């Protein structure tokens, strides 16, 4: 009988709330599913239930892990094939994944765990790859966005991960098709399962009186398109519209975005709030008029795939303005639940926002349709049941 566990790079993490939501629902549906994490997170979400956070078992951190493994190798506590591989690895990069696999594999075996599921084709997936190599414990993974779209020089490649996985999940038809084009030999094991949310956790939007409010949520990084949004806001201001725009999130581009707001004389209209807890994000969504996320392709090819915050905004009953990029058109039906424009086109983005700001009745109708779409397609019990079906099969 297969008994599976989760393996994460970091868990639970503020920037990956969809992972702990899935973990909670998976445990609700399937019982006490073990959770392991390679790194201790620096940003445990405030709304993550304490019993879930307490259930996570962490591997020793890098220095302690290396020291422990050195001692155990000297004592001959690990299979010869593991010791041989570690000796031959030399100074090649990513040796920590082999050490983590050698440490974790025996513990998984002791608990009768025969399969691991991993989120992201990154550190945890490469660790699972070596656990399979050393101990025969199978794995699957959910690929998300830049973990697949951006090339890396790790010795274990994305193709290696796909080849050795029992199955691969992606969170949108777009990314499933992207993988199929690149790895057609493994078509039978690549599946799409949408990220899910609990629609009941998001209060119905009731826009605050006064100036209409735009809201955008995400890390201050290139692929979120916040620079394009700020330019669009300047155009709206020049067209005589009075509004507020909150950009919720922090990150490496925060200083540059603040300078852009200053340069465009938008200090009274556009606000950078910094990162906020989920409760505050939901409160701000419920008081907004329109949600906007100007998704864009980064210089290295990275991009959003299925930004869950769009589904959260739709669950609140907000119309969405975004771009025709990756999996976004699978979330937002143009003209029905929101409006889509080309990426990196601030004038087109401004036109879409203006049309909804000047027609609040149409905006509310789109919000109603979006809320219904979330309940029908993206509710967490259904998406987790689909993943469980793959794991149990």
Image (cartoon, rainbow, N blue to C red):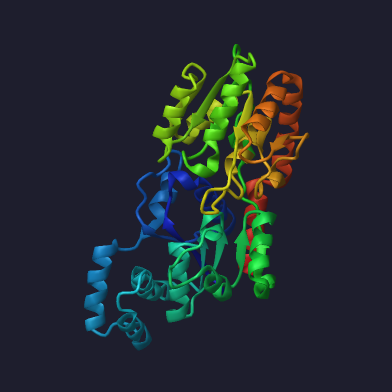
Image coords of residue 25 (percent x, y): 57, 51
Residue 243 visible from this viewpoint: yes
Image coords of residue 317 (percent x, y): 67, 30
Image coords of residue 241 (percent x, y): 63, 15
**359 on left or right of 107:** right
Specify the quadrant that holds the N terminus.
bottom right
Residue 112 visible from this viewpoint: no
Q: Is residue 210 above or below residue 274?
A: above
Image coords of residue 121 (percent x, y): 51, 62
Within the image, what quadrant is residue 57 found in? bottom left
Q: Is residue 372 above or below residue 242?
A: below
**354 on left or right of 115:** right
Residue name at image x 54 percent, y 28 percent: 230
Q: Looking at the image, which is closer to me, 65 or 269?
A: 269
Specify the quadrant that holds the C terminus.
bottom right
Q: Is residue 118 above or below residue 132?
A: above
Within the image, what quadrant is residue 78 found in? bottom left
Question: Across the whole image, how many numbered discs are drawn on residues?
Answer: 0
Q: Looking at the image, which is closer to me, 141 or 353?
A: 353
Q: Residue furthest bottom?
A: 80
**273 on left or right of 309:** left
Q: Is residue 179 above or below residue 236?
A: below
Q: Looking at the image, which is closer to me, 9 or 393?
A: 9
Residue name at image x 55 percent, y 75 percent: 164
């Amino acid at each position: 009988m297969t008994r599976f566990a989760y393996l994460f790079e970091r868990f639970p993490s503020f920037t990956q709330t969809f992972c702990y939501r899935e973990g909670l629902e998976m445990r609700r549906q399937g019982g006490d599913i073990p959770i392991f994490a390679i790194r201790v997170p620096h940003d445990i979400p405030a709304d993550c239930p304490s019993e879930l956070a307490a259930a996570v078992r962490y591997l020793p951190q890098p220095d302690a892990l290396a020291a422990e493994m050195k001692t155990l190798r000297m004592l001959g506590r690990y299979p010869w094939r593991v010791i041989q591989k570690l000796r031959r690895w030399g100074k090649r990069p990513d040796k920590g994944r082999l050490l983590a696999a050698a440490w974790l594999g025996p513990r998984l075996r002791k608990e009768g765990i025969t399969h691991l599921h991993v989120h992201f084709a990154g550190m945890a997936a490469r660790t699972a790859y070596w656990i399979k190599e050393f101990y025969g414990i199978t794995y699957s993974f959910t690929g998300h966005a830049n973990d697949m779209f951006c090339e890396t020089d790790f010795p274990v490649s994305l193709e290696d991960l796909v080849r050795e996985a029992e199955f691969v999940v992606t969170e949108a038809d777009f990314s499933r098709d992207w993988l199929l084009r690149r790895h057609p030999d493994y078509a039978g094991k690549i599946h799409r399962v949408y990220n899910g949310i609990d629609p009941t956790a998001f209060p119905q939007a009731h826009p605050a009186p006064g100036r209409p409010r735009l809201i955008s949520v995400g890390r201050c990084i290139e692929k979120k398109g916040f620079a394009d949004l700020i330019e669009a806001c300047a155009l709206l201001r020049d067209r005589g519209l009075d509004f507020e725009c909150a950009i919720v999130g922090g990150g490496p581009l925060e200083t540059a975005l603040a300078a852009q707001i200053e340069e465009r004389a938008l200090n009274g209209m556009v606000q950078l709030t910094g990162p906020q807890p989920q409760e505050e994000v939901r409160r701000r969504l419920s008081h907004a008029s329109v949600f906007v996320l100007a998704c864009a392709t980064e210089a290295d090819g990275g991009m959003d795939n299925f930004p869950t915050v769009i589904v959260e905004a739709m669950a609140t009953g907000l119309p969405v303005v975004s771009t025709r990029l990756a999996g976004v058109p699978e979330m937002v039906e143009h003209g029905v639940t929101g409006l889509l424009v080309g990426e990196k086109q601030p004038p087109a983005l401004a036109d879409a926002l203006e049309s909804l700001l000047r027609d609040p009745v149409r905006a509310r109708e789109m919000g109603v349709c979006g809320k219904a779409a979330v309940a029908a397609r993206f509710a967490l019990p259904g998406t987790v049941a689909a993943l469980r079906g793959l794991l149990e099969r």
